[in-house]
Amino acid sequence: MFRGIDPTGGRTPVRRGHVLIDRRTEAETLDRLLTDVRAGESRALMLRGESGIGKTELLGYLRDRSGGCEIVSAAGVEAEAGFAFAGLHQVCAPMLSGLRRIPEPQRAALNTAFGLDIGHPPDPFMVGMAALSLFAETARERPLLCLIDDAQWLDRASAQVLGFAARRLQAESVALVFAVRDDGGRTAAPELAGLPELLVTGLPEVEARALLALAHPGPADPGVLNRIIAESQGNPLALLELPRGFTPAELAGGFGLLASVPLPRRIEESFRRQIATLTPTARQILLTAAAEPVGDPVLVWRALGRLGVDVDIDPAARAATEEFVTFGARVTFRHPLLRSAVYRAAGPEDRRRVQRALAEVTDADTDPDRRAWHRAQATVGEDEEVAAELVRCAARAQARGGPAAAAAFLERASDLTPNPPRRAQRLLAAAEAQYQTGMPEPSVRLLARAEAGPLDEVERAHANLLRARIAFTVDRGVAAPGLLLQAASRLQALDPGLARETYLEAMQAGWFVGGDGRGPTLRELAAEALEARATQDPADVCDLLLTGLAVRYRDGFGAGTPLLREALSQLTAGPVDQAGLRWLWFAGTCAMDGWQHAAADAITEAFVARARRSGTLTALPLALAQRMVVQVFAGDLAAADGLVHEFDAVRASTGLDEPSYASQLVAAWRGAEDTTAELVAATTKEALQRGEGLGVAAGGWALAVLYNSLGRYDEALAAVLPAAESDADLGLVTWCSLVELITAAARLGHVEIAGDALARLRTMTRAAGTDWALGLEARCQALLDPDAEPHFREALDRLARTPIRSELARTRLHYGEWLRRQNRRSDARRQLRSAYEMFGEMGMALFAARAARELGSTGETVRRRSDGNVADLTPQEVQIVRLVRTGLSNVEIATRLFISPRTVEWHLSKTFAKLGVTSRRQLRR
């Protein structure tokens, strides 16, 4: 932190001539991190604190103690925050020779992201997997320590990828340590949310006085020192920098001290006072270095040459800058605040001259985007040539998968655009790009500026649509269906293709609201859509899907089922992911509503892949939620758990308040009682505040699954009764609620309630006609019919022909319980034993425990399942074993699970020990 002796008598860690005063707790945390990484584990850590609090010094402490490790250092640069993957390139550049060792699709994604190859916009998650694999491969030789300073200034694409990798580190001998500035209570780097944090706070008063005395040993008025210590709040940089720039007389007498302003501003003002004492040539050198974002010394000196600065003529000026900036392999300032202080201290014309010089020396072929950005910063007023160049930069950014960067280029292009209609168009495009990144607030700001400009009728309709989409994304409340319906009506004559998509979105919003009564009902929305398209025959699968949905919501489930079945058949007959994201959401919903598992599986898999590949983070949470539900029905809770983590990470990184409806369902089937209750309480409260009926119904369904697994049938009935009795057609949520209601009511003897629910369920299952639907109907009938056995056998026969293992296991459990009550213990054991094995393998703990109790009641001693000690495996280990059994390699498993191959190896070694096996071949038995 500063050069000198340790004023605390040697009780704090020393850093090569530097001292970390009163940082024992932080140093111990960092020492443990290094120990773990050297032992083969991986760690991620975020150092969070205000400017100057000592985060950079703590990174330096790590660097100095990391003997035997590969060190990669990087730093976010404020001026580079608009360049997609610029920060990631800093981190990965020293490792790029290892690209040949990672899988080809990952290598291609990383090359495209870095602009080394031309191709389709890379899947952001494939880029994340590439970074994770590259880190793991680099760490095979020796542990890897990545130190990223000023992470709050990383470009958004880089922050998302690094956050993705950090959350998936497990056993690669890799550490990712981020230093993040928090000033004024603002949350910085939301893409890193959820990582372990170490909060770095100010020094206690004793250590603050010791630091101030060592840094400024001259005479000073005691009152002045007390004021500096009080106002610095223990901030080491403030203690070092605030007194600089004052004369000894001022410090001794207290004259000229700063007024009461926020601490970062006071520190910056101290820097500015120090800069003001330099010669014009020295200030020119500092300004050019501050304006060049990459830290390339060659570019800085070439730009200075353009500006007529010759340091050979004025060596004293170069020497004077050494206190502030270091010219080595990279140009580095003493502190990031010093860089911004230098830039802001210069006048506007001086800044523009430097930006113009940097643009002239930046290669237009190898670095066109930075050259364009420098030109834009050097431009006063309007300039269509520069604006057009920025629009081309935006297109390149989109091609690399960087919508945030595209938005920045387009916004600056609009500022430079002389033609008002074209300016409004570019603002609208910038708003669209911001919306794609999952950042609704900047999108609303840009949209308001676009709407203030002269938009034509088509553009105005697009603006209305974007505003409606933002409203739906932000809170999915009662206003969204009406706004989307208005946008669709306006688009009908202008853009029929977009109009049909918007009608679909309006019905989607209406489905979420679920008959709240404060806006257009789902039936009214459907009627509007059908009236608008009354004169048109369905032209393609999307038209067929829209028509089928509208008929279903207007005329009833059975009326729309044939059209929807045909639409899903056509959609899954070709490349599923060719449909748009919004169509895939509704197609997946229709497939699950209609008990069509094969279609639901293909569509939701394509939906997730498409949302990831396009980087559309507003759609990805919906895609992940749909996919989770499909995996729950298939009994693959391990895969669903992986998506829950991804869902949470996307929510945290975007700030979108996407409800955890699918996550609470996963928890309920797993038997996590406390987690389910907490999630349902939170989502139900939020749904009621938004007026979202679906959220209340989904919470009741999850609780009913949980309570039925526990045998608490009265609570299950109470939880699900409102949704089951509602007239709203919520498809999957409605029929699942009916199934849970029948299960609970039948056990409680409420035959009339269960019978009414079965009658309603039957209208849906008979229209669907699939084995899944008819199998569930047969099981529900068995719970009500004294002659239950034929219905149980039909249910088992039908469900066994489907991948719906969760419901097949429940059917065996119900059948076994019925057989035991009939005193047919031998027959009961067969069904209950099978149910117990299935529930255990799927990780459905409460259902497995219930099956075990029933087995015990038949007189059988429950033994461990036949697949070794699989009950001791973690959910991820179970998933890896399952994928090994399908013949996948470690690399393929890693790609499927979004972890590194090294982590797969680590899990397999633990799995072998737990199961008592020594080879993959034994796992396949």
Image: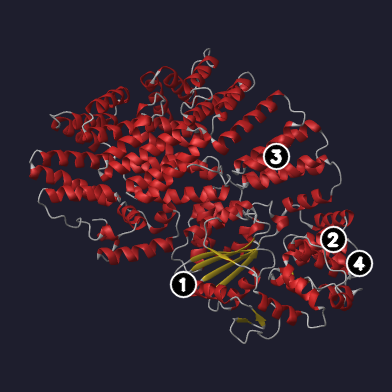
- Which mark lies nearer to you, 4 or 2? 2
Q: What element carries label 2?
A: helix
Q: In which quarter of the image is the N terminus?
A: bottom right
At mark 4, the secondary structure is: helix
Check whether the beta carbons of the residues at disc 2 and disc 3 lie within 8 A of each other.
no
State if disc 2 and disc 1 touch (CB < 8 Å).
Answer: no
Residue linked to disc 4: 280
Task: Give the percent coordinates (x, y) of residue 572.
Answer: 41, 32
In the rendered structure, are the residues bearing label 4 and label 2 in contact, judged by CB atoms less than 8 Å apart?
no
Tell me which amino acid carries mark 2: Ala
For marks 1 and 2, the one nearer the N-term is: 1
Which amino acid type is shown beneath numbered disc 3? Arg
**Side of 66 relative to 249 (left or right):** left
Tell me the CA gap for discs 3 and 4. Answer: 40 Å
Q: In this view, does 6 lie to the left or right of 733?
A: right
Marker disc for residue 445 = 3
Q: Position of residue 650 (x, y in %)?
A: 52, 48
**Scheme of image coloration:** secondary structure
The residue that disc 2 covers is 345
Mark 2 / mark 3, whichever is N-terminal: 2
- The kind of secondary structure element at disc 1 is helix
Q: Report if residue 437 is visible in the image.
A: yes
The three-letter code of the residue at mark 1 reads Asp
